[in-house]
Image (cartoon, grey):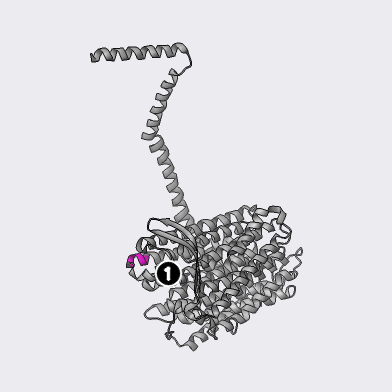
Amino acid sequence: MIALPLLGAAVLLIGGKATNSWGPMFATIMSWAAFAVGLGVIFQMSGRGEEERALSVQLWEWVAAGDLSVNVGLLLDPLSMVFVMLITFVGSLIHVYSLGYMEHDPDKRRFFAYLNLFVAAMLILVLGDSYLVLFVGWEGVGLASYLLIGFWNWNPAYATAANKAFVVNRIGDLGLITAMSVMFASIGALDYATVNENAASMSQGALLAVGLLLLLGACGKSAQFPLQSWLGDAMAGPTPVSALIHAATMVTAGVYLIARSQAIYIETPDARVVVAVVGAITLVYGAIVGCAKDDIKKALAASTMSQIGYMMLAVGLGPIGYTFAIFHLVTHGFFKAGMFLGAGSVMHGMNNRVDMRRYGGLSRAMKITWITFMMGWLAILGVPPFAGFWSKDKIIETAFVGEGWQPWVFGFTALIGAGITAFYMSRLFFMTFQGKARWEDDQHPHESPLSMTVPMMILAVGSISLGFILGPTGILESWLEPVFGHVEHDEPVLAIPVIVTLTLVLVFLGAALAYFMYWKSEVPTEAPEGSALTKAARRDLLQDDFNEVFLRKPGEGMVTMLVATDRDLIEGGMVGKTTGSLAGLSDLLRRTQNGFVRSYAMTMLAGIVVILGAVWVMQ
């Protein structure tokens, strides 16, 4: 599974221009081949008993240094295989879509090589049997995302966006590295089996530190508060990149990390609560930002941030929420990838314009895109029987389970988030496809080719049916039980029918408000000034301003101080004086080596006189 897309990336990057004609198709075939292998493994695992649905493959010894011994190994269990199926299937559909979307790009060979590299790195991340092997994939995904976000790096803004994503993710990576250091200091191992077996023996301080540091790593990769500032800028990459990164792969890595580390979080409830708090903050944060964005891709990026927040909230609720987090992750991979590809289709037909205020009425010109996007829109709203109703609503119900303040705070936060989601996603849908046409005379919207619309249709089918297939049947919960164990579902503090009714009412109100504001009413082509909250939301609630004042400028000041210290106290101080003295001495000695024989004879005579004088004195 890993070698096939890795081979595709190597062939296209090393083969150069000779692969231009057939390289993109070869990369697409390699991605589908990885999916076929994964599907075969799934069938093989499904024929085994629950206790036998895990395969550990040891490849070679990697690190042998003192007490640290790490093998490169793979762990194929129900959790990792769910991610494998999502990554390879949705990723392969995005490859097919890219054949049409990037058809006229002169560097499409390099683009498909990076896509293959991304898929291979993500597979390493989810299939590794230790935190160190996971970290290899973790960094590989970071590299590939940097290359893809900045693919059109001739535009300085796009290059800056790639750098921003890279730097912010390095902050999260520092947390993951430090967490591994604490694990090794406490347990002496980094493989999942040993860590899970010995987690209970770690001190509470070490457990809390590891739990919070792993969360820091997850916040970077999954764009969760306070490391979410890179996500909107990452829209600089080609639209298939947005679908790949923000739907099915990279942003889900943080959720996978927390779920895979369940043994740590079971032993440290405090860290688990912090995970849930971060998820709750982010789901509301992303929803508010999404209400103010007029760029269709950035609105979808804010939506992704919010939906991943739901998943982080679920894994922070403990064992009861793990399965529902993965359930929503799978359904979200389908409907959000479908909507991102739909956004790319709209851009394809609108001369790459992204301003929704210049859209409107596209349902008449792009019927396939309109219908497929509608399926994703209804799914994310949680309208029965679409996928989101079965997955996101389960997280809302679970948020109301518990004691004390938590079920009320987390439950109503998730509930309010559902209402805001209905508003901003309906706003996006109505501004783009409904109402009066607001495009300019030089734009002639048209439907995209089949290479782009067929993947959108397949993802739309998943948006309709996947929730019903995986939810009421209990297939996913049963499949993941060997990893997460059997969990008794406690009753929420509010009756489930009440929670479902409140959710649907808020969704209806949010969608109705958007209907009257952005379909029935005239949408201005220029954004109105808006309230203070609207202005802040357009600027991502001032997150970049905060980072500028409290992080970048103090960091820049510290570097300036260190440079001055180096220049004035080190180079101009003791070290500088010492080097100056040595330089003067060497200059003096250099004068004696002038190449004249008479000078050397005088030096020899002086030496003889000194020696004779010393002998005379000693006698």
The answer to whether residue 365 is magenta is no
Q: Secondary structure at mark 1?
A: helix
The magenta segment: 204-208
x then y, percent, for residue 515: 63, 78
Residue shown at the point (67%, 66%) measured from the top left: 29
Pick the front one: 85 or 562:
85
Magenta stretch, main secondary structure class:
helix
Pick the front one: 182 or 285:
182
Of the residues shown, which amino acid type is indicated by label 1?
A: Ala
Q: Quadrant of the C terminus?
A: top left
What residue sits right under mark 1 in the picture?
Answer: 193
288 relative position to 263: left or right: right
Placement of 108 over or under 457, stated as above or below: above
322 relative position to 243: left or right: left
- The residue at the far left in this view is 619
**Can residue 89 be spotted in the picture?**
no
Callout 1: 10 Å neighbours few (<14), some, many (20+)?
few
Placement of 509 over or under 178, stated as above or below: below
**Can residue 56 be spotted in the picture?**
yes
Q: Quadrant of the N terminus?
A: bottom right
Pick the front one: 419 or 619:
619
Quadrant of res 331: bottom right
Pick the front one: 159 or 74:
74
x then y, percent, for residue 392: 53, 78
The answer to whether residue 205 is magenta is yes
Placement of 87 over or under 321, stated as above or below: above
x then y, percent, for residue 399: 45, 79
468 relative position to 280: left or right: right
